[in-house]
Amino acid sequence: MQLTDPDAIHGRDLRFASRMHRMRTLGGALSAVLVGSTLAGQQAPAWLWGAWALNGFAWPHLAWWLSRRAPDARLSEYRNLAIDSAAAGFWIAAMGFSLVPGAVLLSMVSMDKIAVDGWRFLARTAPAMVLSCAVGWVLLGFPLRLQSSLQEILATLPFLLVYPLALATVTFELGRSVARKNRQLQRLNRIDVLTGLRNRRGWNEAMAAELARHARTRRPAVLMLVDVDRLKEVNDTHGHLAGDEVLRSVAGVLQAYTRDIDTPARYGGDEFGVLLAETNLNGGLRVAERIRTAFLAERPAEAAKQRCTLSIGLAEADLSVVTADEWLRRADAAMYRAKEDGNRVEVACTTVSAPVGTAHARTGP
């Protein structure tokens, strides 16, 4: 949803522009040192020094201002990056193609383009650099001084030492932010939007993990399936919003009467599930009874009018339960036995030879 929200997109683009502002401010200052050392050795005219100052120290803030005011901050920054390339081409020509500072400046603007949008973006901005370089060279009278002085080489050192580290830091922070958001999306993919519980996918993963833990440690675990009786009548009589409120009420009860180590989930439709870790069958029965009676006390008025109750089936993990599907089938069979009369807790048989049946039953008022 956030991916299509205009405000979220605008905020994301402004953050991108802010990152570019920081890098452009740093790069502008460092490149000003680099270009200035070369211009000083060439006795450059005053207007060229003025352009040098504007490009190195004023342009980064003007670019940021333009992006903040633009309807599309990202598109504005892409234009700014193309201008950066054009400016770099001009200064390479102004330095008479001095090899060391020219190569360093070319490397800087190329790194920026590749870091932002890959080699294709670099290729799209290259014509602006080439054209600006050619025009600048003609306007300045075809300066050519390929050999770099020691002063010019030394002026490139701050850039070579600082800018790659800054770019690597920004890239690392961005990668970490993307990884964090991917983890959040993975969690959201396992959450039921209506109830806030795990969805079927998330619960299936938890169920498989809990069964594997039981097989490895032989620690007890109980699987509970919960069905909401007469939810259809609530939907038909009071509307689906009332039905949704009933489902949220069930979710609230499950969260209130289970522990942090347990895993409540909405399994689908009007069915819920709970994985009770470190719990034997007797403990599971006590939890199920508390859940059943708590819902009777806390259910919405529309649910009470339609005599909406919970039918609960339990299945304990044991050596005969080899797969999560088998564990689920046992709990499901017990739950459907409970639904025959409704408002009951039923327990599936867990012996290997006996068919799945009722080992315990409790009926509510």
Image (tube, rainbow, N blue to C red):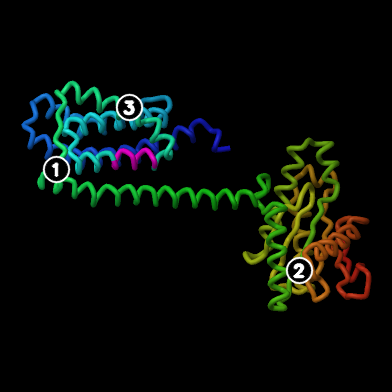
Give the residue at x 75% y 50%: 299
Q: Residues within 10 Å of mark 1 (few under 14, many from 20)?
A: some
Q: Which residues are magenta?
A: 107-114
Answer left or right for 14 relative to 327: left
Type of amino acid at the residue the image marks with label 2: Val
- Tell me, yes or no, whether the highlighted magenta stretch contains residue 113: yes
Q: Which mark is residue 128?
A: 3
3 vs 2, front mark: 3
For mark 1, what is the residue?
Answer: 148
Q: Is residue 364 visible?
A: no
Real-space Cα separation, disc 3 to disc 2, in angstroms: 68 Å
Residue 179 place in picture, x, y as percent: 49, 52
- Tell me, yes or no, whether the highlighted magenta stretch contains residue 116: no
Instruction: Tally the numbered discs.
Output: 3
Type of amino acid at the residue the image marks with label 1: Ser
Q: Which mark is residue 222?
A: 2
Quadrant of the rendering where the C terminus is positioned: bottom right
Q: Secondary structure at mark 1?
A: loop
Answer left or right for 365 relative to 294: right
Is the residue 261 above or below the residue 70 in the image? below
Give the residue at x 81% y 67%: 315
Of callouts 2 and 1, which one flags the residue occurring earlier in the amino acid sequence? Answer: 1
Of callouts 3 and 2, which one flags the residue occurring earlier in the amino acid sequence? Answer: 3
Q: Is residue 333 visible?
A: yes
Find residue 358 and report its image quarter. bottom right
Q: Secondary structure at mark 2?
A: strand
Question: What secondary structure prevails in the magenta region?
Answer: helix
